[in-house]
Image: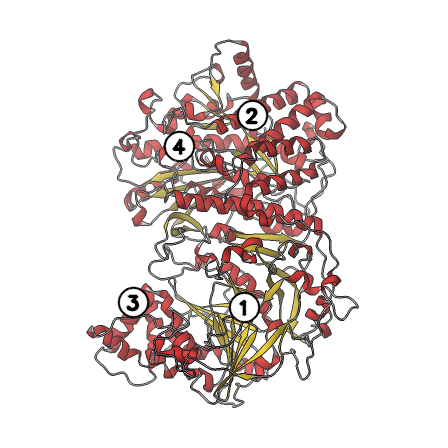
Amino acid sequence: MINQLRDESISPSRSHSFKNSNTGVHNHNDNIYRVSRKYQQQKSSTNCRFVVVAASLILGSCIAFMFFFRKTDINSYSKGMRHQHHHFSLHHNVNHRIAIIIPYIPGSSSSSPKTFPPYFNLFCQSAAGSMSLVDFLIFHTNDIPNYAIPQNLPSNVILINVGDVISLSKHIVDKLLDRKFGGVLNYDELVRSYAMHMNKYPYVLVELKAALAHIFREYLLLSEDDEAGGGGKGSDGTMENKFRYSHWGYADLDIVFGDLPRWITNDELTEYDIVTYGFGDQERVYIRGQFTFHKLNPKTTDLWRDCKFLSDIDERFERVASGSEKLRFESAEGCYSHVILQKQNIRVKYAVKAFSDAVQNSKSDTAHKHGLFLSMGKNIGKDGANINHVGRRSVVYKAGIDRGSDILSLPINWFELENNDPTSTGHRYGDYNIPLQQEIGDKKIIKTFRDIGKGGDSSCMYWAPKKYQLDICAVDVGPTDTVLFIDGALYKQSHKTIDFPAGIVTFPFFHFQEWKRLYRPIQLWPLSRYYDKTTDDGVIGWMLSMDGAIPIFSSHNHPPPPQLHLPDDNSMMQPKQQQPLEKENENEEFDQWYKTEGVSRDQLPSALYCLHSSRRKFPPKPPSPNCDEYASWQDEKNTIILSSGGKLWENNGTKKGKKRTQMMMDSYLDTTLVLTLQWMSNPVRDNEDVTWMIAQLNIAKANIQTWAEGGGSKRRLQPSILLISISGSNAEATEKLIEELESRLFPQGNRKNESSGLFKGCLVAVVISSDNDKKNSVVCRNTLINMASDAAPTRFVLVGLQLERGLILSIETSLFVQRAVAITSHVPGNVFIVPQFAISGDTAIMGNNNGDIHTKEVESVSVVDLLQVKKDMKDDEEPTPQMTSILLSVDCEQCRLDDDYPTDEEVDFVHQIEDLWFDQTTMQISFPDRYRNIIESPSSQSDEFVGVVNDGINGLQTLLLQLLLPERSRALQNFDTSPILLIDRIGPRKGMLTFDLAREVEEFDGGTMSCFNILRLTKLAVLGYRIRILNGAFAMSTPFWRKVVSQMPCTDNNKNDDNDDEQHPPSQISRCNGCTMFDDSMIKLIIMQEVQRSAKAAILWDDLDRVGIKQPPIISNEMR
């Protein structure tokens, strides 16, 4: 039967075949402004202090994250009790290895397509630290598509596809019954009924925990190769049971694992049949579902048979089918725990070696107040001698009670520090002969409720049937007691855990059963990359909270202040003294080698992106979104690549011996333009769909061609990405739209020669939304932005341009972008704002508006002409033409225009950008030599212009940070302008990747209407990025292009709040249907999480800067 469950490529008898290849805040506005004035004249590195102080003001009641530390010698915490450990050894026998079995079904109510939970990468990241001792075997059904299977998992996290739910149900029923079937239900009915039960209530799988070793026994056996290599025997010592593992166990996915190999002692592996780790509620003598392991032998693998809800599963479902019984959930923690306590030949240890977020007064718990730390150590081997399983050690810990201000005085790698003092914590942690926790004193008999004569209704745990609790519930047992079950009797024995530095609390795992209900994929996005490097590059740990994950970098010192060198025009792309970044950073994220015919799908990201969200139904509280539909670059059915970029995406120009051509791309110095469009596939109406689609494609083409060739004939072409979503359930209309799109991309019908297409150098793809329940809903624009940005082959990305507003990049934008990148590329962490303007009437700068759609319209928008228009407006009392940076006032489709919109904060922000841009651009064009001297040596200039620029930039950053204050929440949500940003994908700190930490929020469904459009820019400011204005570059919205993209004249009739859908072609999406999501409570929760995570990160990194991070020494094998 098991053969029916296997993938063709998976065999349970081979050791390597499992692995997949693959809060209240006061008004601090004046404080923030004074802080900005104080630091504006200092060196750029002091900008961090401004950001940190502002972040602390934003956090308000979360001020607990604002630690005040001093450097403290690690040795000051190492003094204390030296534990006796006679006859005790933590060295594990080389034959000891634990298989933790976890079955997983997404369930029918989960997202479509089915996926692993959002926190799965957190589980995997932490599980990797135990690969020297533990394998995690995760059995999942095949309704999770291949592109939704995480890639590059740790070698000890083994995914096993067991087929569909029916096949899994059949296998489970066969294994549980172990006898000829007979009863009221026939066999097929039982299999179908149990499959429906599992699919509707995936949580029912926890009922099976006691029987998992029996159900998946074949996957625990040795292979022939293992036997030939001298593999181990079963725990019972017989050759009949030749298992690959010495122990089996189970756990949950909502677990952050710490250093399991360091905590699991040799006596737990050899002297006890079962070991279970609890949270200190020792009066409940039950086998924990979060983490329990057993010796692998028939004594433990058959214990489940005394639980009738498992062994008599046929009779159970017969009673349900006959109506004599309702199908109720049976907790294995109840029956299984009771069964064990009836045995005389079982030895069990109930240890206190875990902590959780589900604690009484959780808001005062240090994990909630100060965060939970997951620190990644250096590579370790299996018991220090056999390095068969090498991986990074993981240690999970939190601050001690009333010691929150001490935790970050501790080096992140405290557990690897050693010195000549044998009592030091680093020395003791690294010495595997010293237990971290040890039983002391005598064993004492303990009594249960049954022993003291309590009634049958007495209980100590609500989730287990009361009939078991007289034996499970004990008295006179405390959190410092280890409970032991030996020879049919229960004992307690005090235990002592060594004192850890700074009073921290650490255990082998943390159960986040409450936090998981709040987690969205974006909150844990940085964990999607498995860090296994042992150098000082990249991430060495994480700070976790209910708001998500914050990476801890190996080096927290800021790079030196920028030493900018303005290149001459003839050497624009050869900046002086440019130093490339570390090769790991360059290659890891954006330096990809593309083929001659463009990018292939397997070179694109494998991540999942949420197209639609809804409020999670269960549990209803706390309110949290659930993703209903995902997109992926690897989904060949629903993500269609129409153009792969052609030869421009070939990046071999930097290879030795290759001569760079105009078509080749430089991933380090070039910039990718990201554009998005949103369409509907409703029934076609008089070809209006096609006409409107052609109009939108024309403005996209105009921007792409201007971008690719705007640098002039001697400049390199710049790559671009156009990602189009098609929503709705009309397959025929969708197919027609795609066919028309292909014909427009390749008018000659020759797809093989992509360089001849109208979208030369552009990756064009279509994402089809197939969620029928969301057929009238617009996919999230933020999702498209994230998806396209992640696919960019260059370090720099230009994103945020709203084609729906008729915005066209100026012909010089590409040139000024290349200029800015060349000047600042050696100093990571820059974000440039590209201003956007609108002309309210046809003017001279628009050239000949004869209705034709061609490049001439774009070429007429020039920076010189724009400066002249601005000058004319200043000179005339009633300037004509009227130019504005408030696009809302000239939109053809007016969603709202009243006294409250746009907000005062938005008006101030866009006007400040406009003023700064005109001042700096005028200076750069009119006085190039003076401007060059200011840029190259800003600190040595006493020029008045320097002070103006500094004041303006600091004022801009102040406005951004003020938007994060609670009293500005309305302005933050209703910010109508979508900023056009030139973003450096490398952050201001070593190992920091921008799109891991500052993503657009994908749970905001809808189009391009105001919906927290400014949120990502505010997060970037808090995270320490240098926010600048991109001189010379701009985007312009004109009446001609607004009319083209809207397919309607811009009249007052369009400017209303009704937004009649009949005004739009069937495939057009109204700009006014953006931000269609949930309710105020949901919005407030998401924004609080995003703001607090960024503010906490800024404060955390600043504290680590001041404390410093000590690098671990090389620990000898003898010390492991």
The residue carrying pointer 3 sits among few (fewer than 14), some (14 to 19) or many (20 or more) residues within 10 Å by Cα, namely: some
Q: Looking at the image, tell me whether mark 4 or mark 3 is earlier in sequence order.
A: 3
Image quarter of the N terminus? bottom left
Q: Amino acid at mark 4?
A: Gln
Q: Is residue 295 above or below residue 650?
A: below
Q: In this view of the protein, which residue sits in the foreground, 449 or 249?
A: 449
- Residue 322 can be seen in this image: yes
Q: Secondary structure at mark 3?
A: helix
Name the residue carrying label 4: 696
Question: Horizontal and vertical percent for residue 384?
Answer: 68, 74
Disc 1 to disc 4, C-alpha distance? 57 Å
Q: In this view of the protein, which residue sits in the foreground, 317 or 360?
A: 360
Q: Looking at the image, tell me whether mark 3 or mark 2 is earlier in sequence order.
A: 3
Numbered badge on residue 196: 3
Residue at 58% over, 50% down: 64
Name the residue carrying label 1: 354
